[in-house]
Amino acid sequence: MKFRTSLLALVAAAGLAFGAAPAMAEGPIKIGVYLPLTGQNAFGGQLELDGIKLAQQEMPKVLGQEVELVVVDNKSDKVEAGNAVKRLIERDHVNAIIGTYGSSLAMAGGEVAEKGKTPVVGTSCTNPLVTLGKKYYFRVCYIDPWQGSAAATYVYDNLKLKKAAVLMDMTNDYAVGLSAFFERSFKKLGGEVVSKLKYSSGDQDFTAQLTELIRLKPDVVFMPAYFAEGAIIMKQARELGATFRLMGADAMDNPDTIKIGGKAVEGFLHTTFPYDAKKADMGAEAKAFTEAWYKAHPGQDPNVNAALGYNAYYVILDAIKRAGSADQQAITDALAKTKDLPTPLGTLTVNATHDAEMPVGIIEYKNGERVYVTEVSPR
C-alpha cells in the first residue's frame, strides 16, 4: 500500500471524525519552506527540499486547492533564518511553514513564527529548545535528549564500553546539547566521562584535542559534529594513531562522510532516524517512499533527510485536511492532534511538547559502506 494512498485514507477518515467540511477558498494554499540551501548545512537542506518536492508531486492539492511551495534559503545563518521566516509570513502570506535543518536556525526562525502566529513543522532540528514553550512550532523528528541518551545506551549496553570522552563544537547549539545529554545518560548508566574537549565551527586542525584524547585513553569518543568536520576529525585521529571508537549523531548521516573520511571512517558509528533505503524489514510507507525517490532521482540513494522533508509536507497537509481549513490557527490546532499517522519513518504522533517520538537508528561503517545496524531506545 502506497504511503500516499494510506495517508489519504487516514486523513479522509480523520476529516469525518472531526466533522470537517473542506474549505474551498480562492487561490493556492501557500506552504513556506526555509532551509539552508547554501552555506555549511546546504547538503542537508537540499535533501530535505528534494523530499518536500517529491511529496508535493504526489499530493499537489488539498481541500480542492493547489498547494504552492514558497522556498527561501536561510543560508545556514541564524539572522538569515529569522529574516526568511519574517519574509514568508509578512510578504508571502503563507499558511504554514516547513523548516529547518539545523537547530540553531530553527530557534532563530521559531521566535519570528511565534510572533507571527504561523505554524511551522521542523524537519531535523533536534534541540529541545526548538519547541520548548512554543505554541506554533512542531517537528517530525525526535529530540536530542532522546538521541543522546540512545547513543549512550548503545555504547554502554551493546558495545560494553565504559570509559568515554566528548569532543564538541562549542559554538553550535546542536553539538552542545547533544554532548550534555550523552554525558548525563552515560554517567547515569554507570559509565565514566574522562574529558569534555571543545572546538569551534570552521576549525580544520584538531591535533591538540586528539592528542589529549589519546593520552586519556577513552574507549569511545562521542563527537556530535556536522559531516565535514566530523570526517576531518576521523582522518586526523587515525593519522595520529588513535585506537578509541568514534561515535557521532544524525548530522553525520551524509554520503560525503565516506568521500571525505575515506578509510578513516571504518568502524565509525552514528545515530540516525529510523529509515534506511536498504533496511531489511521496511514498512509499506517506507517502501513506497523509496520507490518514488528512485523514480524521481535515478542512481541516487535516498537520505533520511529527504524522508524527513517528505514527512513534514504530508503532516501539514494531513492537518489541513482534518481541520477542513487552511487558516493558520486551524492548522496549528490540528497539528497538535496528529496521531498514528503512517510515514516512511514509522507511525508518527505529535506529543504534548510538539515533538515526534520514535526509535533511534544506529549506523556503522563497515568495509567502506554505511550499514544500518539496529534501532535502540534509551533506558
Image (cartoon, rainbow, N blue to C red):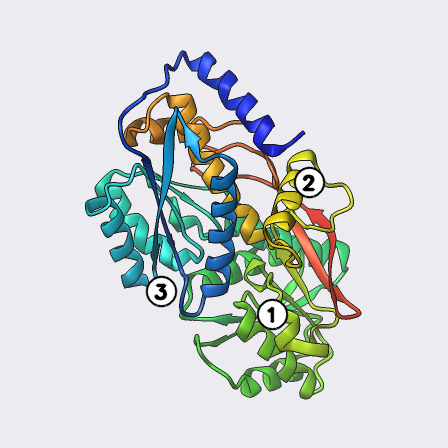
Query: Label for residue 287?
Result: 2
Image location of residue 262, percent across then percent down: 69, 77
Answer with left or right where residue 374 lies relative to residue 129: right
Between marks 3 and 2, how big is the CA–CA gap? Answer: 32 Å
Answer with left or right where residue 139 lies relative to residue 273: left
Badge nearest the viewer, 1 or 2: 2
Q: Earlier in the sequence, mark 3 or mark 2?
A: 3
Q: Earlier in the sequence, mark 1 or mark 3?
A: 3
Residue sitting at 41 percent across and 28 percent down? 62
- Say what secondary structure mark 2 lies in: helix
Please state which amino acid type lies under the numbered disc 2.
Lys
Residue sitting at 23 percent across and 41 percent down? 93
Q: Is residue 61 above or below residue 231?
A: above
Between marks 1 and 2, how big is the CA–CA gap? Answer: 24 Å
Q: Is residue 213 above or below residue 184?
A: below
Q: Is residue 211 above or below residue 326?
A: below
Query: Label for residue 256?
Result: 1
Camera-side residue of 46 and 276 = 46
Task: For residue 182, say whether it is visible.
Answer: yes
Badge 3 local density, few (<14 within 10 Å), some, or many (20+)?
many
Camera-side residue of 203 and 371 = 371
**Which residue is labeled 3 in the image?**
75
Answer with left or right where residue 68 lies relative to residue 252: left
Task: For residue 126, say whether it is visible.
Answer: no
Residue sitting at 19 percent across and 46 percent down? 90
- Say what secondary structure mark 3 lies in: loop
Please state which amino acid type lies under the numbered disc 3.
Lys
Please state which amino acid type lies under the numbered disc 1.
Asp
Badge 2 local density, few (<14 within 10 Å), some, or many (20+)?
many
Give the position of the C terminus as an image quadrant: top right
- Say what secondary structure mark 1 lies in: helix
